[in-house]
């Protein structure tokens, strides 16, 4: 019995030693796991700090997609620098600073292209611009106008400065650019300096297009209350014209002239034939009311309207009909002034004697003064206003 008991105690002791060894082994493993966890935590923390610094740190230089000149322009603008200074005029009626022989690029139809026109705030103010429609073959007609009702040289300059009246012969270019016709006009311009050259090819069938280009060019060059078109075989009294238009200066959209309504000519081969006669109803109908083409005036708003919409304004065969059609449907006041279409002597002479001086005189049968080169001086002597009328008129 004692021997068995001793054996049991030995077996128990061995088991006790085994259990203690397992506990020690388990404790060692737990310690090892804690060390790895701590190392992993430290590694994760360091990695997080590293990536966080890279993400949140601001770069010292960012390259713009634009060029160096664009970047410099941005810096200048941010500093308040004006890259395009504009000089302002000192007075209202003063010398025009734009060369009138320079070609003018046509404006866009959609909206006024301000880059191609001069802002009204930076331009001189004028009362009216008179464009005398002329052709390459009309040198003698122009000379007859220069020696009668159109002031020359210093007087024309004085007229611009004191009365705000601009007068120019209006002409485009020949189909052969730089040809003999253009050179003749250039020589005449050097002598008289009284032309407004248009970006337009001259031609009788292109009068409607020329009218659009004239108004668009004139309204771009001069900030005036009225824009006048007159033919070079018509006699004009400038003071009477100015006083007549001054009565309508408070009206925003006014169209002044001798209003008429002639027949629409459907027959081919006749003068003033209208190819689009069918648009005006039955054969034999008349046109809508419009000013006769020898002389008429429109206010600034209407000239601006033509400039904005010139590429969609329809052109009929006759220039005066075309102009009248552009105002149909607009809120425009038509003024029928019969003093703008007096006959030549004795008609206009009788009216002068009665104290009712005419604005313009011409012969209906010739659509101007018949043989105007020979007769313009006679009409001026018998139907012209007093020599001091223009300078004493309050416009």
Image (cartoon, rainbow, N blue to C red):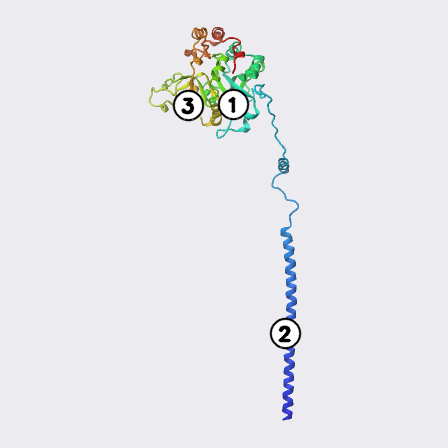
**What residue appears at the point 51 percent right and 23 percent down from the top-left corner?**
219
Residue 66 location, quadrant: top right
User: How packed is label 2: few (under 14 Cα within 10 Å), some, or many (20 or more)?
Assistant: few
Please give the residue where the numbered disc 2 appears in the rendered image.
Answer: 26
Q: Is residue 126 visible?
A: yes
Quadrant assignment for the N terminus:
bottom right
Q: Earlier in the sequence, mark 3 or mark 1?
A: 1
Residue 361 location, quadrant: top left
Name the side, left or right, on which 24 lies relative to 347. right
Work out whether residue 112 or residue 256 is closer to the camera in this orientation and state it.
256
Please give the residue where the numbered disc 3 appears in the rendered image.
Answer: 325
Q: Can you give x and y, in whole percent of width and height, for residue 206 in the image?
A: 46, 21
**What residue appears at the point 37 percent right and 24 percent down from the top-left corner?**
279
Please give the residue where the numbered disc 1 appears in the rendered image.
Answer: 219
Q: Earlier in the sequence, mark 3 or mark 2?
A: 2
Q: Earlier in the sequence, mark 1 or mark 2?
A: 2
Name the side, left or right, on which 155 lies relative to 348. right
- Give me the C-alpha separation between circle 3 and circle 1: 20 Å
Q: Can you give x and y, in whole percent of width and height, for residue 355 in the image?
A: 45, 8
């Amino acid at each position: 019995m004692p021997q068995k008991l001793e054996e049991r105690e030995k077996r128990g002791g061995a088991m006790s030693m085994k259990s203690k060894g397992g506990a020690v082994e388990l404790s060692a493993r737990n310690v090892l796991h804690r060390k790895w966890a701590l190392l992993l935590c430290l590694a994760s923390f360091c990695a997080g700090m590293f990536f966080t610094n890279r993400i949140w740190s601001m770069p010292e230089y960012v390259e713009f997609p634009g060029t160096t000149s664009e970047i410099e322009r941005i810096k200048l603008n941010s500093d308040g620098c004006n890259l395009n200074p504009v000089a302002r005029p000192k007075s209202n009626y003063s010398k025009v600073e734009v060369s009138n022989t320079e070609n003018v690029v046509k404006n866009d139809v959609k909206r006024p292209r301000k880059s191609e026109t001069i802002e009204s705030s930076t331009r001189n103010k004028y009362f009216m611009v008179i464009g005398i429609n002329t052709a390459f073959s009309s040198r003698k007609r122009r000379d007859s106008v220069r020696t009668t009702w159109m002031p020359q040289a210093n007087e024309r300059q004085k007229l611009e400065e004191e009365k705000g009246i601009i007068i120019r012969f209006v002409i485009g270019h020949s189909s052969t650019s730089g040809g003999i016709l253009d050179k003749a006009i250039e020589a005449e311009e050097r002598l008289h300096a009284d032309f407004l050259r248009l970006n337009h090819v001259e031609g009788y069938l292109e009068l409607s297009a020329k009218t659009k280009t004239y108004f668009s060019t004139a309204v771009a060059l001069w900030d005036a209350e009225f824009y006048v078109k007159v033919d070079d075989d018509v006699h004009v009294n400038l003071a009477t014209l100015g006083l007549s238009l001054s009565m309508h200066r408070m009206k925003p959209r006014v169209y002044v002239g001798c209003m008429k309504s002639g027949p629409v000519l459907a027959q081919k081969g006749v003068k003033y034939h209208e190819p689009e006669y069918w648009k005006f109803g039955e054969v034999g109908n008349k046109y809508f009311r419009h000013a006769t083409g020898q002389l008429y005036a429109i206010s600034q708003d209407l000239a601006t309207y033509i400039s904005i919409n010139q590429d969609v304004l329809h052109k009929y065969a006759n220039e005066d009909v075309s102009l009248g059609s552009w105002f149909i449907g607009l809120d425009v006041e038509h003024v029928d002034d019969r003093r703008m279409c007096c006959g030549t002597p004795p008609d206009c002479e009788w009216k002068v004697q009665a104290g009712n001086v005419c604005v313009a005189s011409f012969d209906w049968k010739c659509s101007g003064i018949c043989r105007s080169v020979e007769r313009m001086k006679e009409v001026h002597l018998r139907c012209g206003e007093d020599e001091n009328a223009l300078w004493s008129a309050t416009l």
